[in-house]
Image (spheres, rainbow, N blue to C red):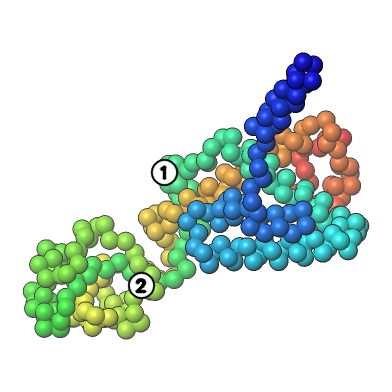
Amino acid sequence: MRFLILFILILFCISCKTEQFTPEEPAIMRIGSSSLTEKDLINAVGLNATPDQKLNYIREWSDKELTYHAAITSGLDKDDFAKKTIENMKREFLSTRYIQQQMGKIGAIEVSSEEIREEYKNNSQYVRNEPVIRVAKIVIDSQQSGWRARDGLTVENFRERGNLHSSVPIPPLEDIKYAPKKDFSQETWDVIFYLRVGAITLPIKEDGHYAIYLILAKENAGSQAVFEEVTEEIRRSVLNRKQREFVENIYTELRNRDDYYYDSEYMANLEKTAGIPAAQEEKE
């Protein structure tokens, strides 16, 4: 009876271990103790990766692991230079990761339209680095159609009459933005940029069509850009500044900790020699 109870207990224990055992995911490739599974592959290249992309990743993984294991086998990881380099890389990674984590806590940094306009108003650096022009354009399919469309055109009726002929709608003239030279062929630019404001061109042959232009405004390189031209540039500039300020606030907070110390006299002399303003706040 005792043996029967012992046998039943052994069977029960075996069944429990069998139920708890999770078989290891089969490896696509194994090099030493490192293995690449299909799950690893999908995590690396994504669900929609092509067979070519998967093959390329597997080959790259294989080459990297082979050389890594060869380096370990040869003792390179014990080299003082390698240890220091790995430690520096670790510090760099974790420092960057910490900043990202702190920025993630406050969510995306926003730039309001008021901030953009205020930056533009208070900053005269937003000048054009190339000539620009504002033009309205009638697009027609042939020179003959172009001459018919050109007949009777004036500045006042350009949009209304032009839209009767143009294959591309002409927007309200006040909504048309400045365009740089690169938006036109050299032949077209040589015609439109050297005409007076208010002039209307004859039909100009372009790639696959003809065009008639009304010159609305033009500015040379070095002139002050209008707000609409540089809105996105200003947004990026303000966003970068706010991000730098946020990061600097993190550094300032960390410097206020008790375990932060620097030799203020040494640093002041060094900064003076380097032409960098000495730190305003000193902590000893």
Residue 118 lies left or right of residue 9; in this view the side is left
Q: Secondary structure at mark 2?
A: helix
Which residue is found at the position 49% from the left and 41% from the top?
A: 110
Q: Which mark is drawn over residue 113?
A: 1
Foreground pick, 222 / 190 = 190
Callout 2 environment at 10 Å: few (<14), some (14 to 19), or many (20+)? Answer: few
Q: Looking at numbered disc 2 in the image, what kind of residue is underneath it?
A: Asp
Q: Residue 183 bears which disc, if any?
A: 2
Q: Quadrant of residue 154?
A: bottom left
Please name whichever residue, 21 or 10, is drawn nearer the observer in this view of the structure: 10
Name the mark nearer the viewer: 2 or 1.
2
Name the residue type under label 1: Ser
The Cα–Cα distance between marks 2 and 1, rounded to whole angstroms, is 27 Å
Residue 99 shows in the view? no
Closer to the N terminus: mark 2 or mark 1? 1
Q: Is residue 258 visible?
A: yes
Crowd tier of the residue under label 1, counting other residues whose Cα lies within 10 Å: few below 14, some 14–19, many 20 or above: few
Measuring 54% from the left and 64% from the top, which residue is drawn there?
53
Which mark identifies residue 237? Answer: none
Quadrant in which residue 181 is drawn: bottom left
- Give how far across and how far down residue 99 sits, in percent: 66, 42
Does 30 sit above or below residue 189? above
Residue at the image position 69 percent from the left and 41 percent from the top:
98
Q: Residue 21 location, x and y as percent?
A: 67, 36
Element type at mark 1? helix
